[in-house]
Image (cartoon, rainbow, N blue to C red):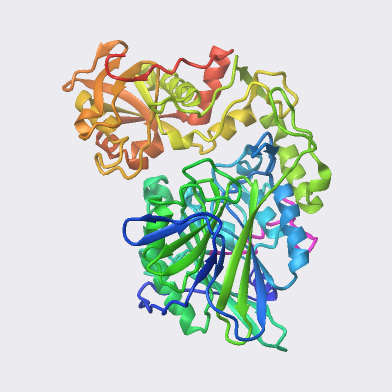
Amino acid sequence: MRDALRARGVQAALAATALGVALVAPLATSTTQTAAAVTIAGAQSLSDKVAVTFARPTGKTTQVHLLAYNDLHGTLDPASQTLYGSFAGGAAYLAKVVKDRQRTYGANEATIFAGDGIGASQLANSLFHEEPSTIVSNLMHADFASVGNHEFDKGRQELLRIQNGGCSADGCTGAPYALANGGTSATFPGADFQYLSANVVVDSTGKTLFPAYGIKSFPTDLGNHKVKVGFIGEVLKDTPSIVTPTGVAGLTFQDEADAANRAVAALAAKGVKVPVLVIHQGGFQSGPATLNGCAGNLAGSDIEKIVQRLDPSIKVIISAHTHAEYRCTITTNGVTRLITSASSFGRVLSDIDLTVQSTNGELVSADATNVLVNNAQNKPGPGVTRQPDPSLADPAVQKVVDQYVAASAPLANKVIGSITADLTRTPSPLGETTMGDVIADSQYEATKAPTLGGAVAAFMNIGGVRADMIYTNSAGGEAPGQITYGEAFTVQPFGNSLVTKTLTGAQIRSVLEQQFVGCGGQTTQRVMQISATLKYESTPGAAACADRIGRIWISGVLVDPAASYRVTMNNFMATGGDGFTVFNQGTNPLGGAQDIDALTSYFASHSPVAPPALNRIVAPGA
């Protein structure tokens, strides 16, 4: 792996966490403006300007091209993924767009992805321990990747294996493994790219888990002289709240801005004047979203808050995590920065163009374009089946995709039941979804027997509901409405196990309050999905946390604050995941089936499954 990186002019360096911060004076900036700027509190000016000029060139310049993607989540087969009226995404189709541009840009290109390349993935990838997605990124000649929260789903040691190679506990079941040089390996080779983790520290050593940054050099037209770009990789500091505790054991996730600023100081000491932040955190367009737009300007988003505190020398930011696409600029204290995000599942590629002063390596300007990754001959619509366009797929990556899809097909294409209409993650005004309801019902059914937990209700975290079930989908040739194991796995890919605990009625009220920002330490609104046996009144806009949850019923009976109830959740939530720390207070825990097994069993006994009425979370008096 490291030989492959060196061959592409790539360096990686570990940064000690005690590095000091050296702020670099900002260059004068100007922008090409395409919409009026919006002024917000704190002397912030945000707009959807995209071409940013930082300095006037004083001589020859060098173009450096960054190809960036994020949140691929092991999407080997694009299935019916769509975006902006097109079937889009999938590993082979993303690879074709990447490789075409790599050939155009030659040695003046770097390919980067901003985390979640693995985890929460399709069965064809997960069944082989996330190795196929890593092989795909190798074949795309990726240089660097920031870690994402899902890189930690299986823990630190498994992530180190993904980086360094070697077989999993049950062997190298994905062999033969395709190599970037055209050969194959009987042993999983690991990542050719370098993971970066400037803000993830190993408690026992005080050092970052992976290098804090990497450096790549690019040729100029000044003989052997090269310009350098540094890439700082980070993940959101709140990762421990959204990953199972065993996945982040022994690690500390530091403040993103502080860690990035330390890395900038280290890069400056090595003569690198163009630092690029690659961070698995992001925002959303708050108005009607467009592929290359910035509706709402990311104002108030998690990424915007981080950007406010960055060293002024960081002027280009590749963001991720929210599965959103945008191309924005953020101006803070006179420093304008370009920020991009490339949706998810390989549906978008960000093509970022840097103009660098050839003589001194300073950044002159930056621009970006988000490119939609089309994958079909036709357009989506009611009852329309995607017709793949092989000419839009990279042959080498398509061969890898075919290998693992075929290997997983006997399990993936097994029909487990049926639906009468779509089950989706589209929420009601109070946050309830049909897909989430069915999952919660399945977990209640799996644990209601006295010997299996004696549950009277079940809770499901909305972030764990990863896909919809669409009536017309037919990935394995099954009839409309039939649901396969592969489709169910895509909805529930984490392999979490069920846990039933005893909570008091008062604790049930408290954990429901924790769905809202500022209540019980919650930082993000997360409405849990609940089984049909549970119903409650919700007033999200109430000023006091205690006023946001009204009456609560279990099996039609008002919940008694002093009474005890057996309730089920997955092991992630049972240990306080997603900020639901009240579940930690539950007593008499009893382990149960895996979530995917509960869901498949539910379909076996309840098919055809109809979309539930969204009447479990209701307004007061409803």
Residue positioned 49% across, 46% down in the render: 285
Q: Nearer the viewer, residue 352 or 5?
A: 352
Rendered image quadrant of residue 437: top left
Q: Residue furthest right?
A: 391
Q: Position of residue 157 (x, y in %)?
A: 49, 56
- Tell me the magenta residue range: 175-195
Residue 455 visible in this rendered orientation of the protein: no
Q: Nearer the viewer, residue 424 or 284?
A: 284
Q: Position of residue 598 (x, y in %)?
A: 49, 24
Q: Is residue 183 magenta?
A: yes
Left or right of 459: which side holds 111?
right
Q: Residue furthest top?
A: 556
Left or right of 8: which side holds 588?
left
411 shown above or below 295: above
Q: Is residue 309 magenta?
A: no
Residue 70 visible in this rendered orientation of the protein: yes
469 shown above or below 127: above
99 shown above or below 73: below
Q: Main secondary structure of the magenta part?
A: loop
Residue positioned 71% across, 26% down in the render: 474
Rendered image quadrant of residue 264: bottom left
Q: How many marks?
A: 0
Assign the C terminus to one quadrant of the image. top left
Rendered image quadrant of residue 182: bottom right
Q: Position of residue 218 (x, y in %)?
A: 66, 77
Residue positioned 78% across, 38% down in the render: 388
Assign the N terminus to one quadrant of the image. bottom right
Q: Position of residue 431 (x, y in %)?
A: 40, 28
Left or right of 142: which side holds 280?
left
